[in-house]
Amino acid sequence: MIMILGVDVGNYYTKTSTGISFISKVSSIPGILANDPVTIGSKTMYLGEGECDTEYRKAYKESYLYLLLGAILKSTTEKENKIVVGLPLSQYKADKGYLINRILQSKIVKDIEVQPEGAVSVPVDYTGIVVDIGGGTTDICLVVKEGRKRKIVQPYSLPKGILNLESEFINCINAEYGLDLLPVDADRIIKNGLYIYGERQKFSMDIYKEFVESIVRRIQVDYSLKTNNITLVGGGANKLYRAFKKRIPQTQISNNCFYANANAYAAIGRRIWGE
């Protein structure tokens, strides 16, 4: 049996349409338990170790094939798989062919399709602005209907996402209080507060507010915010939804936004290959 799988290889997390997710880190050096080895050719890498790959162009990430294969191995035991993945809107046209060839040459899949991130994850009858907040990029576009076809208008990517945001947030706290916190601590501090030796400390969320404002300012240049719907998708959607909603009242968030791209890719795959 051939498995059709959607895989969202994100800068922060890798997700699949079967509900699998793991942090997008690989290293040639195994951790203490040496879990999750992934081998391509003669080289073995270990998932969840090392640092996130900071290469901006996703198709060229050194870690990409290992993350993709790791996602497949965690999602299915089938040996032959047809996979749909995505690229940021600003990289889609230029890098689609290269990524398809790179994946096929690795022989880790039977067939591959590449789709634009974000835009494909909203319902087929949706019209309006889509903001896909990822780990390293934020993709923005306007989706319109022309007859029975859906068209993506003025797509672009901002080279900033949740990874950058959390890093800046933690750097500000470290500078103010002389701490050595890491970006991974950001969620914990926002949810539970900042405590130093048991005493609660104040911290600013201005960096998050400015991030939202910068997106809003950019959207206003290209689209009408007053007359368009706006939907947030991607791994950062939940974290910034309230700030967007406060700024733009008609803001919506996609169902299961964390897996929205991966689930959309799988649906596209089933339409393409008819299985």
Image (cartoon, rainbow, N blue to C red):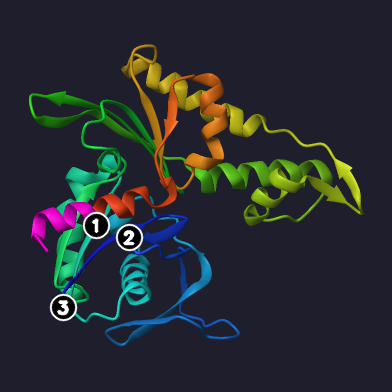
- CA distance separating discs 3 and 2: 17 Å
Residue at image x 30%, y 33%? 156
Q: Which residues are magenta?
A: 266-275
User: Which quadrant, please, contains the N terminus?
Assistant: bottom left
Which disc is residue 17 wearing? 2
Examine the structure image and report whether residue 161 is included in the region drawn in magenta.
no
Which comes before the other along the chain, label 1 or label 2? 2
Q: Mark 1–mark 2 contact, CB under 8 Å?
A: yes
Examine the structure image and report whether residue 271 is included in the region drawn in magenta.
yes
Which comes before the other along the chain, label 3 or label 2? 3
Query: Does residue 204 appear to the left or right of 15 in the view shown?
Result: right
Q: Nearer the viewer, residue 39 or 147?
A: 147
SS type, badge 3: loop
Q: Give the residue number, with chain letter if any, for mark 1.
A: 266
Is disc 1 surrounded by few (<14), some (14 to 19) or many (20+) residues within 10 Å? Answer: many
Query: Does residue 77 appear to the left or right of 21 in the view shown?
Result: left
User: At which x and y percent is residue 27?
Assistant: 47, 75
**What kind of secondary structure does the magenta stretch mostly adopt?**
helix
- CA distance separating discs 3 and 1: 16 Å
Q: Give the residue number, with chain letter if any, for mark 3.
A: 1
